[in-house]
Image: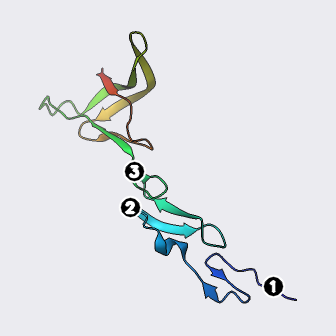
Amino acid sequence: MIKCICPLGKLGKNCFASFNSCKEISCLHADKCITLDLKGYKYVCICSNEYYGNLCQYRVARALINIKNLFHNNLIHSVPVVVIYFVNVYNNMGVTLLIQDILVYRNVPFNQILLNFYEKYLFITIYICSNIF
């Protein structure tokens, strides 16, 4: 007896019956919904870079860092060194500052996006501090 191995979305003796579990699911901000099992009970929403979650319902935390030229001097075109600190604040029997990450950039041109930071959390670190040298 020959049995058909049906692709996802098809079932039956000859794979003629079709189903789409994604038809009942409304993925928000998603490019695509894909069925993961033969019975159509499991699915996954393929989210864009700016969203996450099983239905792409959460927007990722985002930080854009851009250094403007406030000198109005045509001789200065960039900043030699920029140091960016991602700092969290904890309150365990006193306030504790904890540096989560440090990024160092060299020769940063003015008016250019220095950091386009996406993180799959609702919130990023409490403080983003920078030093310009």
* Percent coordinates x, y for residue 126 in the rendering: 34, 28
Compute the Cα span from label 1 to label 3: 42 Å
Q: Is residue 4 above or below residue 96?
A: below
Q: Is residue 130 above or below residue 32?
A: above
Disc 3 or 2, which lies upstream in sequence? 2
Query: Looking at numbered disc 2 in the image, what kind of residue is underneath it?
Result: His
Q: Give the residue at x 15% y 34%.
A: 74
Residue bearing the label numbered 1 = 3
Q: Residues within 10 Å of mark 2 (few under 14, many from 20)?
A: some
Q: Quadrant of the C terminus?
A: top left
**Picture quadrant where residue 57 is located:** bottom left
Which label is found at residue 29? 2
* Percent coordinates x, y for residue 16 in the rendering: 65, 90
Residue bearing the label numbered 3 = 58
**Camera-side mark, 1 or 2:** 1
Task: Tell me if I can see residue 106 in this picture.
Answer: yes
Which label is found at residue 98? none
Secondary structure category for the residue under label 3 = strand
Disc 1 or 3, which lies upstream in sequence? 1
Compute the Cα span from label 3 to label 2: 9 Å
**Picture quadrant where residue 79 is located:** top left
Q: Is residue 78 above or below residue 44?
A: above
Query: Looking at numbered disc 3 in the image, what kind of residue is underneath it?
Result: Tyr
